[in-house]
Image (spheres, grey):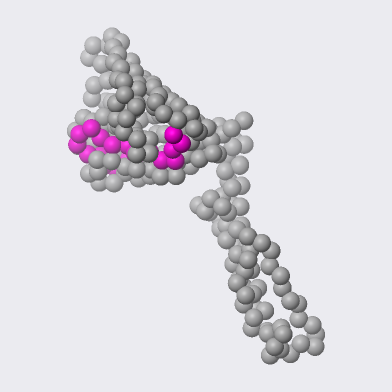
Amino acid sequence: MASNFPSSLDTFTNPSSTDAMDSVSVPHASQHSDLNDAVEALQAKVGADSSGVASSHDYKIAQLEGRDTAGLVHISRTTIGTAVSSVTVSGAFSADYDSYKIIVAGGAASTAVNLEFILGATTTGYTAAAVYNIYASPSAQGNAQVNIAHWEAGRGDTTALTLNMDVHSPFLTEYTTFQSAWSRAADAMAVVGGYLNNTTSYTGFTIETNTGTMTGGTIDVYGYAKA
């Protein structure tokens, strides 16, 4: 008998002291097999230490403990490959959180690049404005873009990739907004913000370069714990 747990509770037949080992109604081997199946199902539900299975108790308790000690809960880390022009992160957004922090750090680009942020497969309707300073001539400047194919949320060069971004309501059926900051060693720093002109619910995103490639570094996704 395969275990029904955790969908429903199992029903077992207990042997009596008069049942033989080869009893037809309560076979001894089946008793062991049923018990093994049930224990395995219990272990899967409870989870091993530091389990990454989102349905396990170990994982869920770790998430709750994280909420008690910090406003940010780590959701995922994606390692950027070698000489890639885009990286997709799936399963980043859910009903668990309304706002998220996304950090790209480490690694390097093959040249000076923009890190373009795309929600799902949507490549239209992005609006944003930026205020930036160029180190060599530090007076505030700005630009704006309306109804384009992405948000320019970060930068990269041959020394590092840099993006520190807050995304609000990506999973909810309402406008998604963002604020991001980056500081590239070669030339400048900026603060950027904007919105996506639709009410689509998203679960993932892609970061890609406008030119050249990325190698190494990580993309970390955090959720802001709800009060």
Horizontal and vertical percent position of residue 106 = 32, 37
Q: Residue at x 34, y 18 (%)?
A: 129
Magenta residue span: 200-218
Q: Residue at x 42, y 34 (%)?
A: 102
Horizontal and vertical percent position of residue 211 = 20, 34
Q: Residue furthest top?
A: 139
Q: Specify the quadrant that holds the N terminus.
A: bottom right
Image quadrant in which you'd find residue 136 = top left
Horizontal and vertical percent position of residue 43 = 60, 62
Q: Does residue 197 sit above or below 207 in this rendering?
A: above
Image quadrant in which you'd find residue 12 = bottom right
The one nearer the camera, 199 or 69, is 199
The one nearer the camera, 71 or 175, is 175
Q: Does residue 109 sit above or below 182 in this rendering?
A: below
The one nearer the camera, 33 or 202, is 202
Horizontal and vertical percent position of residue 100 = 47, 33
Q: Specify the quadrant that holds the C terminus.
A: top right
Would residue 143 be found to the left or right of residue 164 on screen? left
Would residue 80 be found to the left or right of residue 12 on screen? left
Would residue 173 be found to the left or right of residue 215 on screen? right
Does the magenta portion include 227?
no
Q: Does residue 13 sit above or below 64 in this rendering?
A: below
